[in-house]
Image (cartoon, grey):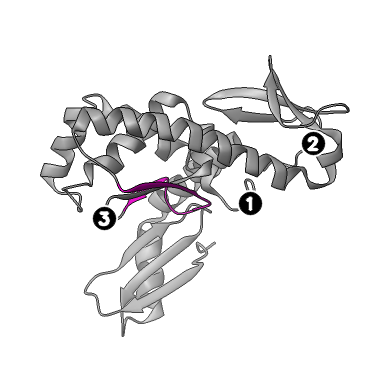
Amino acid sequence: MKLKIDKIIKSKRRTIALEITRDALLVVRAPLRTPNRFIEKAVEEKRDWVLKKQSDVLARDEKHPPKHCAEGETFELLGKEYALSFQNGVSQIYIDGGRLLVPQSLKGNAQLAITGWYKEQAYRTLRERVDYFAAKAGVRYASLKITSALTRWGSCSAGGRLCFTWRLAMAPVDKIDYVVAHELSHIGHPDHSSAFWRRVAELMPDYAPRREWFKQNAALLRRDFFAE
């Protein structure tokens, strides 16, 4: 059986390239006039690679199944898990031991409410970590914003404006620190040059395993993991 090609993108390029998306889809990029039979042949030649990559993506997705905001379902905050519990007499969302307590009155709109709570937690944590690493790096940033980005964990504009997705609040603090150090290193180093990575290493000598964590947990950025 031939492998399914989910999308073919032809452009002014010289070679054929295969890509497995975060949804385990196979995307092929090819030169403009490449016959489809050549593309199919190239894909079949890479069959083992394609199947392995798709399997790896699906395995990561299973690690983080979609959230349905059901009673007892676990939610992560700073790398720790808490069981969702709807409670009467509770006026706001908060952590109590191993439970994430949510007002019973918010049950019908729990997803939106929990998302808002995550944004608050993300801002609180990131403000602290950004201030710490900015002082360590000896740099100043212009602003800090929490977003709902699904394509990246963080970003830094040329003017030093920092943005972080609220989903980062689910990661352990030491992993969050990598994203913070990464984005702050872009102040003065807008690309991913060797000078940029030297700056990251100065701030965090052991950044490599922390960076790998985000590759293994990319499913947290899936739209259907926690849709808004």
Task: Please name whichever residue, 137 or 33, is drawn nearer the observer in this view of the structure.
Answer: 137
* Type of the residue with mark 2: Ala
In depth, the one of 190 and 25 nearer the eye is 190
Helix, strand or loop at label 3? It is loop
Is residue 19 in view? yes
Q: Report crowding for label 3: few under 14, some 14 to 19, many 20 or more residues within 10 A (C-alpha).
A: few
**136 left or right of 106 in image:** left
Question: Element type at marker 2?
Answer: loop
Q: Secondary structure at mark 1?
A: loop
Farthest top residue?
A: 97
- Measured as percent of width and height from the top left, residue 72 is found at 78, 27
The residue positioned 24% from the left and 70% from the top of the image is 15
Mark 3 highlights which residue? Answer: 159
Res 184 → quadrant: top left
Q: CA distance from mark 3 to mark 2?
A: 42 Å
For badge 1, the amino acid type reads Asp
Q: Residue at x 35, y 34 (%)?
A: 130
Q: Quadrant of the N terminus?
A: bottom right
C-alpha span from label 3 to label 1: 32 Å
Of marks 3 and 1, which one's residue comes earlier in the chain?
3
Magenta-highlighted residues: 142-156
Residue where numbered disc 2 is placed: 70
Of tags 3 and 1, the one toward the viewer is 3
**What residue appears at the point 52 percent right and 64 percent down from the top-left corner?**
4
Indicate the position of residue 152 as horizontal and vertical percent values.
42, 50
Residue 117 shown left or right of residue 128 in the figure: right
